[in-house]
Amino acid sequence: MAYRRQLIEVLASGPRTASSLARELDLHRKDIEDDLAHLVRSARAAGHRVHVEPARCKACGFVFDANRLTRPGRCPDCRGSRIYEPLISVEKRGADEP
């Protein structure tokens, strides 16, 4: 439980990618990717706002689905593999809000 709370705290301090979270928390990227979907559901259930800037192709600008929290392998339009990872952030519910 403390691990997921730590993830929420890190994401509340600013937007991060799965790779940057893994580096910051000294974990493997695969471990972070497995927990991100659960974290998003848990944060929303707790009343926090979750913002996801979707992955985007560097070559053609194709924007992937915002539900995808990990970096895609290739762009479906141009088949390029240079892709910006999705950015995830959490806006915590204020203490004065119900």
Image (cartoon, rainbow, N blue to C red):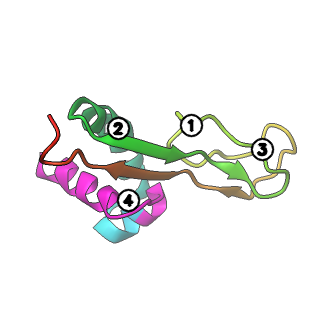
Please rate how many residues cluster around mark 2, counting C-alpha atoms within 10 Å: few if below 14, some from 14 to 19, many from 20: many
Name the secondary structure under disc 4. Answer: loop
Q: Does the magenta stretch include residue 14?
A: yes
Q: Where 23 falls versus 86 (above or below)?
A: below
Magenta segment, prevailing SS (helix, strand or loop): helix
The residue drawn where x is 83% and y is 56% is 59
Identify the mark at residue 28; answer none if there is no mark: 4
Name the secondary structure under disc 2. Answer: helix
* Residue type at the position of mark 4: His
Residue 94 visible, this angle: yes
Q: Where 2 falls versus 47 (above or below)?
A: below
Q: Which of marks 2 and 4 is in front?
A: 2
Q: Position of residue 26 (x, y in %)?
A: 31, 68
First reached walking from the N terminus: tag 2 or tag 4 = 4
Q: In this view, does 85 lie to the left or right of 49?
A: right
- The residue that mark 1 highlights is 66
Name the secondary structure under disc 3. Answer: loop
Boundaries of the magenta span: 1-20
- The residue that mark 2 highlights is 40
Q: Where is residue 25 in the image (x, y as percent from the top left)?
A: 29, 66
Residue 26 visible, this angle: no
- Mark 3 → mark 2, Cα distance in angstroms: 24 Å
- The residue that mark 3 highlights is 62
Please rate how many residues cluster around mark 1, counting C-alpha atoms within 10 Å: few if below 14, some from 14 to 19, many from 20: some
